[in-house]
Image (tube, rainbow, N blue to C red):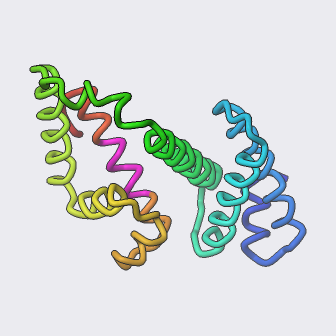
Amino acid sequence: MDIDDLLKEAQNGDKKAESRLFEILCLRFTKLANYNSMKNKQDIEDIVQKALITVASEYKKMDFQTGFLKWADRIMTLKLWNHFTKRRRWKKIQIPLSDYQHEINAPSTDEDQELRRMILRCFEMVVGSEKLYANVLALSYEGYKAPEISQKMSITTNYCYYLLSIARAKIEECLEKGKVE
């Protein structure tokens, strides 16, 4: 039985199929976390559990013709990304100000100014193409999580994840290629 058959049976209420589906996802998510060089087993378990909860709360509401695994993997990837960005923020907070005071006082270079202009231009291009991108990016930057953003904007959590991933991908594309397609 393939994953699409398990998904359909699970969506129709078959508990055995649902159990098997989530066993497969659990193994898949754990491998994905290990692939991303996570060493702390407790962190891996926590992230996998959060991703599984998100999948469990949303998969019955959606109509998947194809792409269920890609959707589920994207949820896990976003959970991993959130984990790494939180850890990076925490580490930054732990560094004493004296360690980087010289960088704050250093005059900005032309390269810094050019990079800032390029980032701003890319952000304006992405936001100009869709106003929803501006809202989700701004709320995300302010520290809101996807469920909070979706509640504030009256959209589904999955649609919020979708908007965030597309907006970020477009910004990356713009920074690499100089344009948004």
Asked whether 84 or 105 is in front, the reply is 105
Q: In this view, does 154 lie above or below 175?
A: below
Residue 83 higher or lower than 10, as above or below: above
Give the residue at the far front of this rendering.
98
Q: Give the side of residue 89 with respect to residue 4, left or right.
A: left
Residue 174 lies in the magenta stretch: no
The number of numbered badges drawn on the structure is: 0
Q: Is residue 176 left or right of residue 166?
A: left
Residue 132 on image: x %, y %: 26, 63
Q: Is 165 a magenta residue?
A: yes
Residue 97 is situated, as x and y percent measured from the top left of the image, at: 35, 37
Residue closest to the eye, 101 or 27: 101
Residue 130, position as x, y percentages in the image: 21, 58
**Closer to us: 65 or 83:** 83
Magenta region, main secondary structure = helix
Is residue 54 found left or right of 142 in the rendered image?
right
Q: Is residue 149 above or below residue 71?
A: below
Q: In the rendered image, which quarter contains the C terminus? A: top left
Q: Does residue 79 appear left or right of residue 95 in this picture? A: right
Residue found 84% across the figure and 74% down from its top: 14
Residue span colored magenta: 162-170
Give coordinates of residue 157: x percent, y percent.
48, 69
User: At x 72% / y 72%, what residue is drawn?
Assistant: 11
Q: Is residue 17 above or below residue 179?
A: below
